Image: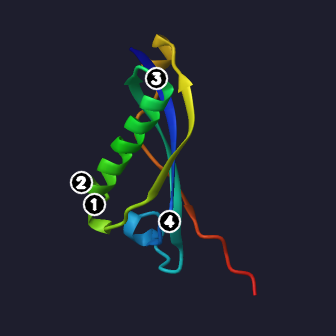
Amino acid sequence: MATFHVLVEASGLDIPAAELELSSEQSVRIAGFCTWRVIAASTPSEAATQAMGVVAAQWSNGKYAGLRAQPVLTASDVRSLSWLARLRAKNTGYIFYPHEPRVS
C-alpha cells in the first residue's frame, strides 16, 4: 500500500470567522478552506476518497460539528509520498479563506 498526500478543498461555507476564533470581527465570513491529509491507499483515487471522508468526519463529528456546516469537498491534488516525506508531513490544520468583498 502506498502513502499519498491529498489536498482537500472545501467550498459552500458561510461561517462567521469569530465562530472559528479566526477574527473578532463579526462581518468577516468564511467561504471555504483547504487542507492536506496523509492517506495510505492502493490508488490515488482511493486516497482522494478516503481523504475527503476524513475531512467530512471532522466536520460532522469532530471539532467543527457544532457549526452545523457541511462543506462541499473536492480532492484537487494527490501526490505519492516517500517514507521520509510521510514522516515529516503534517496531517492536521486548515487554511480558511473569506468570502470575496462585494464590489458595488
10 Å neighbourhood of mark 1: few (<14), some, or many (≥20)?
Answer: some
The residue under the point 46% across, 12% down is 83
Of callouts 3 and 4, which one flags the residue occurring earlier in the amino acid sequence? 4
Alpha carbon distance from label 3 to label 1: 29 Å
Mark 3 belongs to which amino acid?
Answer: Thr
Q: Are marks 2 and 1 in contact (CB under 8 Å)?
A: yes
Query: What secondary structure is found at the residue carrying circle 3?
Result: loop
> Would you name the residue on which mark 3 appears?
43
45, 90: nearer the viewer: 45
Query: What secondary structure is found at the residue carrying circle 2?
Result: loop
Q: Nearer the viewer, mark 3 or mark 4?
A: 3
> Would you name the residue on which mark 2 appears?
61
Alpha carbon distance from label 1 to label 4: 16 Å
Q: Which mark is residue 65?
A: 1
10 Å neighbourhood of mark 2: few (<14), some, or many (≥20)?
Answer: few
Mark 1 belongs to which amino acid?
Answer: Ala
Q: Which corner quadrant holds the N terminus?
A: top left
Of callouts 4 and 2, which one flags the residue occurring earlier in the amino acid sequence? 4
The location of residue 3, given as percent across then percent down, is: 44, 20
Residue 100 located left or right of residue 38: right
The residue under the point 32% across, 58% down is 64
